[in-house]
Image (cartoon, rainbow, N blue to C red):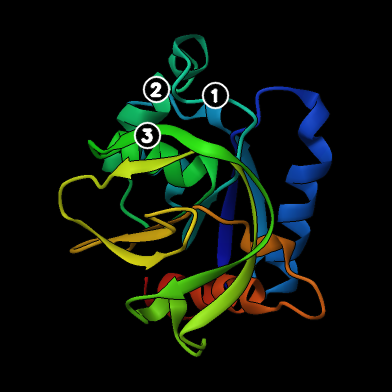
Amino acid sequence: MKQILVVNLFLGPKRKLSFNKLVARVREAGGEVSTANQGDWSSSDPSALTRSCDGIILSGTEALLTRTADRKQFVNLFEFLPRVDVPILGICGGHQALAIAYGGEVAKSARHIESFRTVELEDKDHLLAGLTAKIRVMQSHYEEVKRLPPKFVRIAKSKDTKIEAMKHEEKPVYGVQFHPERWNEGNQAGKRILENFIEKIAAKQ
């Protein structure tokens, strides 16, 4: 079983249930889970935190990364992420944090999006393998990636969000704007995405 480090990007205890839900869903998808807080990611040696895991999943966050006060709390994370040498999947705020860390741009969405929405896949790389051309996944965000970082490509889009998912061209680094962990009986694409990350991407390490 692959060891997945799930990193909590939430800033306060009110979102504990959301983080615990993510952890439970990663386990349900087949990962052996350990956890860390984003504040732990200030070590000058990334291998100190990653040597015992096969992949990393970054949670969402209630922080708004366009807000200076919130963004300052993630400075160490932004510096740390490009030096990590294991696969990474960023979810929602984690997706946005990856974009900033690698030189992309995050901006406010036209409106708050909170519901299951249709997403169109453009590249069925390992992360999106086995899915149909259009999937239904849960959205919940006020901000989004507006400009891809260098060496990243878009792999999914939607009517509401231009960059629903991205991947690095050379490294196993992925981001999704939606919440794959919030699948339900009628919309299980998110479960397949988590399984793919664990079985097809982290498994290669």
Q: Secondary structure at mark 1?
A: helix
Q: Amino acid at mark 3?
A: Val
Q: Are marks 1 and 2 in contact (CB under 8 Å)?
A: yes
* Looking at the image, residue 29 lies above or below residue 79: below
Q: Is residue 190 above or below residue 19?
A: below
How many residues crowd around disc 1 within 10 Å: few (fewer than 14), some, or many (20 or more)? some
Q: Nearer the viewer, residue 100 or 23?
A: 100
Disc nearer the start of the sequence (3/1): 1
What residue did someone put label 2 on?
76
Q: Name the side, left or right, on which 132 lies relative to 32.
A: left
* Residue at horizontal 60 percent and vertical 49 percent from the top: 6
Q: Which residue is mark 1?
A: 39
Q: Residues within 10 Å of mark 2 (few under 14, many from 20)?
A: some
Numbered circle sitting on residue 161: none
Callout 3–callout 1 Cβ contact below 8 Å:
no
Observer-nearest of 142 and 60 = 142
- Residue 28 point in image, percent of width and height: 75, 72
Rounded to the nearest angstrom, the CA distance separating label 3 from label 2 is 17 Å
